[in-house]
Image: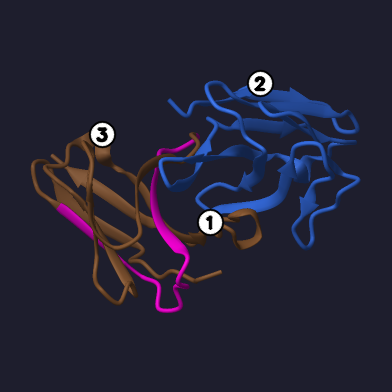
Amino acid sequence: GAVVSQHPSRVICKSGTSVKIECRSLDFQATTMFWYRQFPKKSLMLMATSNEGSKATYEQGVEKDKFLINHASLTLSTLTVTSAHPEDSSFYICSARALAGGGDTQYFGPGTRLTVL
Amino acid sequence: LAKTTQPISMDSYEGQEVNITCSHNNIATNDYITWYQQFPSQGPRFIIQGYKTKVKNEVASLFIPADRKSSTLSLPRVSLSDTAVYYCLVAGREAAGNKLTFGGGTRVLVKP
């Protein structure tokens, strides 16, 4: 149980284009999902908190117009990197919050490798 | 959010037990302790979560002393495939949507 998927797993795009990444909770509903980015040999950095049916909450320093987040259903959140540039190249990881059995746990997707040329 | 401190790296050998201790001196009353494992180019994988005393599952054990200011993840009889980065995180169930703040993690290298 508690499986989270991401699509695509890797994407290469040209500078100036937009890229959409999907995050799905496959066997549970998640009112809250999170988006992280990770640079090589570094830790995960939280970008934003995505709440179903409401606007996302962005961490300080993350441009909300650059990284558009939509959480239209209890099992799907999307991150759109708009007008991508080479410095946006990174590993993007989502997680979904699961409340079960008294616990409160985030389950992570496999990640999306974005390369902007 | 409680800050965590854990060793940067640890080396071990196949078949040995690996214990990673994490300090979280400022842990709050409603905070849980969660450990994740991450392989290169993959998302973190949930290992174990606890609040106090000892928790055990098929993969690992988690020891939490009474003051909860630290916790120890114990991996029994590690194999080469356990080489990964292990993260200790502390977050409250109601705190800010349960945001997780990742520290540097502990790089565990299992040698043959």
Q: Colour of chain B?
A: brown
Above or below, B86 against A9 in this view is below
Which residue is denoted by mark 2 in the rendering?
A8
> Between residues B5 and A104, which one lies in front from this camera angle?
A104
- Left or right: B78, with B39 as reference point: left
**Quarter of image, res A76:** top right
Q: Secondary structure at mark 3?
A: helix
Residue at point 29% right, 51% down?
B108
Residue at point 36% right, 63% down?
B8
Name the amino acid, label 3. Ser
Q: Position of residue A69 (x, y in %)?
A: 80, 38
Name the amino acid, label 1. Arg
Which residue is denoted by mark 3 in the rendering?
B81
Alpha carbon separation for disc pair 2 and 3: 26 Å
User: Which dot, 1 or 2, sits closer to the camera?
Assistant: 1
Q: Colour of chain A?
A: blue
Alpha carbon separation for disc pair 1 and 3: 32 Å
Disc 3 crowd, CA 10 A, few/some/many (<14, 14-19, 20+): few
- Name the outermost residue toward the front: A102
Name the amino acid, label 2. Pro
Q: Secondary structure at mark 2?
A: loop
Which residue is denoted by mark 1 in the rendering?
B93
